[in-house]
Amino acid sequence: MSVSEPPPTVRTWTAQLKKGLVELCVMGALQGGETYGYEILRRLKDHADQLAITESAVYPILARLAKEGLVQVRAAPSPAGPARRYYRLTSLGRRRFMEMREYWKKLSEAVDGLVPGDKP
Amino acid sequence: MSMEDLDLGSEARMPMDAYLDAVDQALRASGMDRDARRSITDDLETQIIETLAARAGPRPTPADVQGVLAALDPPEAYADAERGGAAPSAERQPPLPPPAAPAKASPRLSRTALVGAIWGCVGLLIAIPGLFLLMVPLHYSSSQKERVRSVAAARSVRAMEKTAPDADREEIAERYEQIVRDFPETKEADQAREALRRLGREPTAEPEAPRPQPVPEARLNWFSLLIVLPLGLIIVLSGLGMTICGMVAIVQIRRSAGKIYGMPLALFDVLLYPVLTLGLLAILA
């Protein structure tokens, strides 16, 4: 069974679980430097296939992060089509990302301790 | 391939514009503001154009555009993206029931007015009995002094009558008269009246014009000051606090649009001490 296709019985749970993780991943992608929306989406698809992240999740998050002042937006000409919108983490966004990452580490460690794997 | 060569004709562009319009409409229906909607559709348009350029060459056909659009999430997926970013294939959750309208808060009594009223009344309850207790010893002291003086005067006259029986009866009678006039309500005055009758002289009635009594001098000693100063401070602070609380409460009540009541109490807070002060000034004047 593919991780990206959860069984119907846990789809609601996985959808809830993804909430917040997508935002963490988007900010993590921006931690590497300025980039534009479609590039962020490609990186996430390449590195976090299990999360089944799509454009309908990433672009609204980018819009919200910009509204909250966590990312800065700059329009730059594109080789084709409309101008690309380049996103960059602000200092506030970097601080927020560090806090989220620290919390995620502690949380995942705690969950690992509570939910043992397949080892006997 | 260079994307600079991409030639997206109007026929091929039409389904893409329709898709972007549908996304914008779904976002608008969800209550998203215009800037956020434009941000999303611009990113989406960039994605579609770059995907077309990579897949279909410099002149994509409407079918190529349809193929790219088919791989994208349905327009309504963008509106509920914050609910977990589920892929379009994921089973959609049943719509949540509309949140229950928040229960209308019942109007409440203005706490500020209540605090002000309690503050001011407690101040009065402390200060007034305190001042009363302070005045009693002063009054008692004044009465005692009068009593001592009357006794002294009576003794002096009786001594004069005993030690100098030949003294001028007129002078002794005059002294008794003086006691009757100065201390009419005392036991010494009664004794003086009897003595006057014994001397064959009817005591005169009440003096025609009562001699102005000297106002007893209420001197405050250090002990009294120790009481008066804190009590005065309590009254001032209570008055200021109560009045200010009342004014604040009036403003809050007027701005609350019916959520806070207690205007009479607030008015009571504002007016009590000013009215008491004016009354006191009127009495003193």
Image (cartoon, coloured by chain):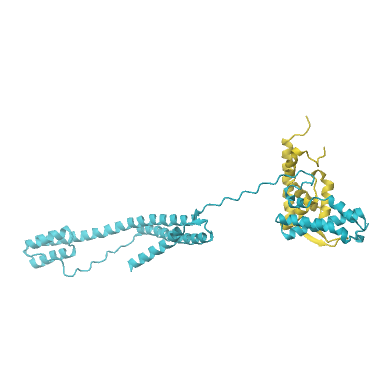
**Quadrant where the N terminus of chain B is found in the figure:** bottom right
**Quadrant where the C terminus of chain B is found in the figure:** bottom left
Query: Which quarter of the picture shows residue B191?
Result: bottom left
Query: Which quarter of the picture shows residue B3?
Result: bottom right
Q: What is the display colour for chain A?
A: yellow
Judging depth in this view, the residue of B140 and B66 nearest the camera is B66
Q: Position of residue A119 (x, y in %)?
A: 79, 31
Q: Which chain is cyan?
A: B
Q: Is residue B189 left or right of residue A23?
A: left
Judging depth in this view, the residue of A111 and B45 nearest the camera is B45
Q: Position of residue B279 (x, y in %)?
A: 36, 65
Q: Residue furthest top?
A: A120
Q: Is residue A11 left or right of residue B230?
A: right
Can residue B230 be seen? yes
Q: Is residue B62 left or right of residue B257?
A: right
Can residue A35 be seen? no
